[in-house]
Amino acid sequence: MNWPSDQISPTIQISGGYNDPNPILRNLTCPIGCPVRSGWQPQAWRAWGWSSRSRTSVFAWEFFNEVDLIDDYNGKLVSDWHRDMARYLRSIDPQSHLITTSYANPKGDPVVENLPELDFVQSHHYGAGDIAAAIERDLADTPAARNRPHLQGEFGINHSGAETGKIDPAGIHIHNGLYACVGQLHAGTPMSWWWDSYINPRNLYPLYGAFNRWIKGFDFVAQNPKKINATFADETTLRCYGLLGKTRALIWIQNPHHTWKNAAKPDYKPSPTKPTTLIIKDLPPDKWTLETFDPHAGKTTKSQAVTVTANQTLKIPLPKIKWDAAFKLHR
């Protein structure tokens, strides 16, 4: 949950949507830099933190949505404010909710994001032509992500849901972001802001259903996964993102030519890659089941038994790929 805010002012306006009937949330303000025990924080927290609904449904407290958009941004002042706020909120929150913040600039501010008081770090990214590459870069370029989880808290291709629907009606950027994030070791799927003006009117929910069926059965905690060690037998432009756990693996192969930006061109023609072989290394020797998964239909199209010997290598022949391909491994 985000403390609702006026993004062009250095004053946080706690108002639950600016017209909240709850008097605790109406017309309360606290400038960044104010003492943490001044009026609004405990009142606002009590309004949300003690409700039975928030105890189970609130994932985290987000202190500020895109804090770098305030007037006269001062990293030291913002850092001190987040530190003091986090310490105080943690002292009065019996549910121990996670605490985070966010920035409009994907680069964020390491001074704030590296605070030990923040539990995970976020990136927001709009306008990228190649979503899979963009969110991979955001993760790599965020220093705080080296010692805590990283979540793509917002992503998209346009600052309007309606315009997004015009240039990517099929949700190609949503699809690519979902499947890429797993093998890149993000803490969760990239999150779109445009549920009401893009995803819902375009009925893009099946994209999420297909993705959910791909990851079904993969316990991201119990599997203790790491990035899969994979290469291709031939020189290719294909990308491979994958996770290898104790008994399961998820693999996504992408033709980087197929992005929303290319597909939006009137004269766009798919550019399939040449057939090659995916070589997966460091697999525990055992009998495995390899499932070929159609990421668009959201279903397994082929299942076969494979044996990994002492060389710990599995070779998977790949046909021409126009967009992408996915696999599941389990034993």
Image (cartoon, rainbow, N blue to C red):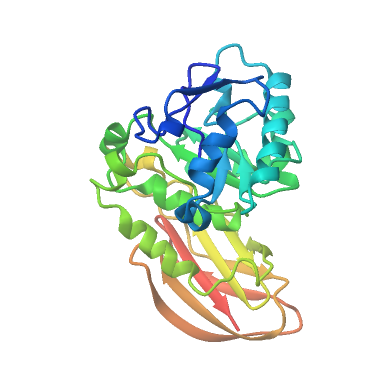
Where is residue 187 drawn, in percent x and y?
Answer: 60, 53
**Residue drawn at (74%, 46%), measured in percent from left and top?**
146
Q: Is residue 14 left or right of residue 198?
A: right
In the figure, 113 relative to 306: above or below? above
Where is residue 11 drawn, in percent x and y?
Answer: 53, 19
In the figure, 238 relative to 287: above or below? above
Q: Is residue 287 left or right of residue 213?
A: right
Where is residue 237 drawn, in percent x and y?
Answer: 54, 50
**Residue drawn at (40%, 48%), measured in percent from left and top?**
174
**Could you say which quadrant of the image residue 86 lies in?**
top right
Q: Quadrant of the C terminus?
A: bottom right
**Which residue is situated farthest in the left direction here?**
201
In the figure, 109 relative to 175: above or below? above
| Number of residue marks | 0
**Residue drawn at (41%, 55%), measured in percent from left and top?**
323
**Could you say which quadrant of the image residue 198 lies in?**
top left
**Which residue is situated farthest in the top direction here?**
72
**Residue drawn at (43%, 65%), measured in percent from left and top?**
212
- Nearest the viewer among 58 and 206 is 58
Q: Is residue 134 left or right of residue 194?
A: right
- Nearest the viewer among 210 and 303 is 210
Task: Mark yes or no: residue 77 visible.
Answer: yes
